[in-house]
Amino acid sequence: MADLPLDGVKVIDFSRVLAGPLASMVLADLGADVIKVEHPERGDDTRDWGLPLAPHDTTYFYSFNRNKRSVTLDLTTPTGQAQARALVAEADIVVENFRPGVMERFGLGFEALAAVNPKLVYCAISGYDRYGPEKDRPGYDLVIQGESGLMSINGDPDGPALKFGIAAVDIFTGMSAAQAVLAALYQAARTGKGRRIDLALYDCGIALTTYYGLDALLLGKDPARVGNAHPSIVPYGVFEAADGPLVIAVGNNSQYGALCHDVIGRPDLAADPRYAANLDRSRNRQPLLAELSACCATTFASRGFVARGHSLWRSAWPACRHDQQPNR
């Protein structure tokens, strides 16, 4: 077996659905022994989601629960609570995503568990700030995508706001939780003292807006949707070639020069002062994108040309002069 960095670390995972299970799965992938505690009758909710693989197994469940062991406990009973405490007494990490106060009612809150296991790292994930006025609201990825503003920046400029194709907030929260747990585990190894970690889906949803959120704060208005384009980098998006969509991602000014000179044969676009730097291209994106769209329409995305030393797009294509006609 490979020598993994968390070999010997034990995690008790009381969470279900996505953010919590993803966090503990990251730890499992790093070598931790993760014991997933499930409801004795229904198990994790995701055992009923996605493509069925067996009576109680689905692709959705395995996507967030690989490399774990599982046990069923009824945490509403004294017996189940006692068994859970016995598991935690020998653990390094606890992950849970019950509503605030539920684990305390089970006698499994951080204070109670830390009293018998001082080095315990306890990660609690909730929908909203567990100390704020909305602490009792359930948290769902779709709702948080809407409330945080993520949906407002996803979609075409003239179309409706759209949810992300994946549970972006849940996934980002789970990854952030794993990161925080690893930092706390390092601290516990140095100091002998564990700690409680609190994460809220809403807070992570706000964090995911990144530069969109900062722009909104500084400009005092909502940022516009740009579809498959990028709000700050040009050209960076999807173009229609003769045989299908083509992704072009030009990350800096030298790459833009290489695109114009070495790939599309349009040095005039590189020399045009309207497009000299990315900020210029962003201000003048419409005429530039029109030129690039016209050139892409006359070439084939599947023909396999790559400008050496530059990663400009996903699907490579041959050098295309603006006056060339496509040929097979």
Image (cartoon, rainbow, N blue to C red):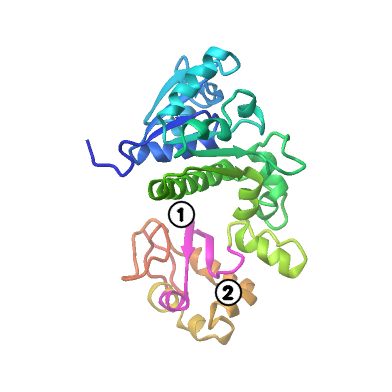
Q: CA distance from mark 2 to mark 1?
A: 22 Å
Residue 41 shows in the view: no
Residue 301's label in the rendered image is none
Question: Looking at numbered disc 2 in the image, what kind of residue is underneath it?
Answer: Leu
Residue 134 is situated, as x and y percent measured from the top left of the image, at 75, 40
Q: Residues within 10 Å of mark 1 (few under 14, many from 20)?
A: some
Task: Indicate the quadrant where residue 66 lies.
Answer: top left
Q: Nearer the viewer, residue 130 or 311?
A: 130
Q: Secondary structure at mark 2?
A: helix
**Quadrant in which the N terminus is drawn:** top left
Return the residue nearer the eye: 111 or 199: 111
* Residue 287: x %, y % from top left: 62, 74
Q: Residue drawn 46% across and 75% down?
A: 256
Task: Locate the C terminus by quadrant.
Answer: bottom left
Dot 2 or dot 1, earlier in sequence: 1
Q: Which residue is mark 2?
A: 288
Which is more foreground, mark 2 or mark 1?
2
Label 1 secondary element: loop
Residue occupying the far front of the picture = 115
Judge whether 216 appears above or below 23 on screen.
below
Corner quadrant of residue 233: bottom right
Specify few, some or many for label 2: CA neighbours under 10 Å numbering under 14, 14-19, or 20 or more: some
Q: Residue at x 40, y 76 (%)?
A: 258
| Residue 211 falls in image quadrant | bottom right
The x and y percentages for residue 228 are 58, 57
Q: Which residues are magenta?
A: 230-258
Check disc 1 and report the residue beneath it.
243
